[in-house]
Amino acid sequence: MLLYHGSTDLVNIPEIRKGAACLDFGRGFYTTTSYEQAEHWAKIKMRRNHVNIGYVAIYEWNDTAAEKEIRIMRFCGADEAWLRFVVSNRRGESVEDGADIHIGPVADDNVYQTIRLFETGAYDAEYTIKRLKTEVLHDQWAIHTDKALQYLTFWTAERIIKED
């Protein structure tokens, strides 16, 4: 199975960085099964870093071995467990559940506006999830451990050039 990572750096050797913890699934190396989503992430990082070149790195994921040897937590959709997990991580309250990897929907900017209204109490969980069901949600794979990174092999990368 192929996974993609968008960045301003060519990442042929993925690593778990100790930086940004306030992401959807906490600290980790983030990938997706969607080339378009990875390209979108690369373009966002290009704008933030004021650079003209980004990359979509393409990896092979050994899902057969990984399923047997590491702990994978999957959120099958935008349900209440996913919502509470994302909110906790975005608040910096990392949820330690022992998973080597978390897989589930991306809370992009459109989705996060709805989540923010849940956080402030304007929406309850049921209404928030109902609203999220109308969004097109790409997936994200947050790899948290070096053990899990062993199942990810760099294949190639494509260069993304800034559009005028």
Image (cartoon, grey):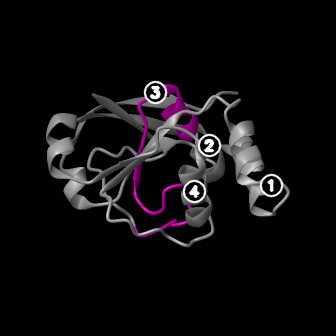
Dot 3 and dot 4 residues touching (CB under 8 Å): no
Numbered disc in front, either 2 or 1:
1
Whether residue 69 sits left or right of residue 90 in the image: it is: left
As displayed, is residue 28 above or below residue 42? below
The residue carrying pointer 1 sits among few (fewer than 14), some (14 to 19) or many (20 or more) residues within 10 Å by Cα, namely few
Marks 2/4: CA–CA distance? 20 Å
The residue carrying pointer 2 sits among few (fewer than 14), some (14 to 19) or many (20 or more) residues within 10 Å by Cα, namely some
The quadrant of the picture occupied by the C terminus is top right
The numbered mark, 1 or 4, whose residue comes first in the sequence reads: 4
Image quadrant assignment for residue 24: bottom right
Image quadrant assignment for residue 12: top left
The residue carrying pointer 3 sits among few (fewer than 14), some (14 to 19) or many (20 or more) residues within 10 Å by Cα, namely some
Q: Which residue is mark 2?
A: 44
Q: Quick one: 7 or 118, which is closer to the camera?
A: 118
Mark 4, secondary structure of its residue: helix
Dot 2 and dot 4 residues touching (CB under 8 Å): no
Magenta part of the protein: which range?
A: 18-42
Q: Amino acid at mark 2?
A: Ile
Numbered disc in front, either 2 or 4:
4
Numbered disc in front, either 3 or 2:
3
Q: Position of residue 64 (x, y in %)?
A: 16, 35
Q: Position of residue 138 (x, y in %)?
A: 54, 33
Q: Residue at x 15, y 50 (%)?
A: 69
Q: Which residue is mark 4?
A: 86
Marks 3/4: CA–CA distance? 23 Å
The numbered mark, 2 or 1, whose residue comes first in the sequence reads: 2
The numbered mark, 3 or 2, whose residue comes first in the sequence reads: 3
Q: Residue at x 21, y 53 (%)?
A: 70
Q: Which residue is mark 3?
A: 35
The numbered mark, 2 or 4, whose residue comes first in the sequence reads: 2
Magenta segment includes 28: yes
Q: Amino acid at mark 4?
A: Val
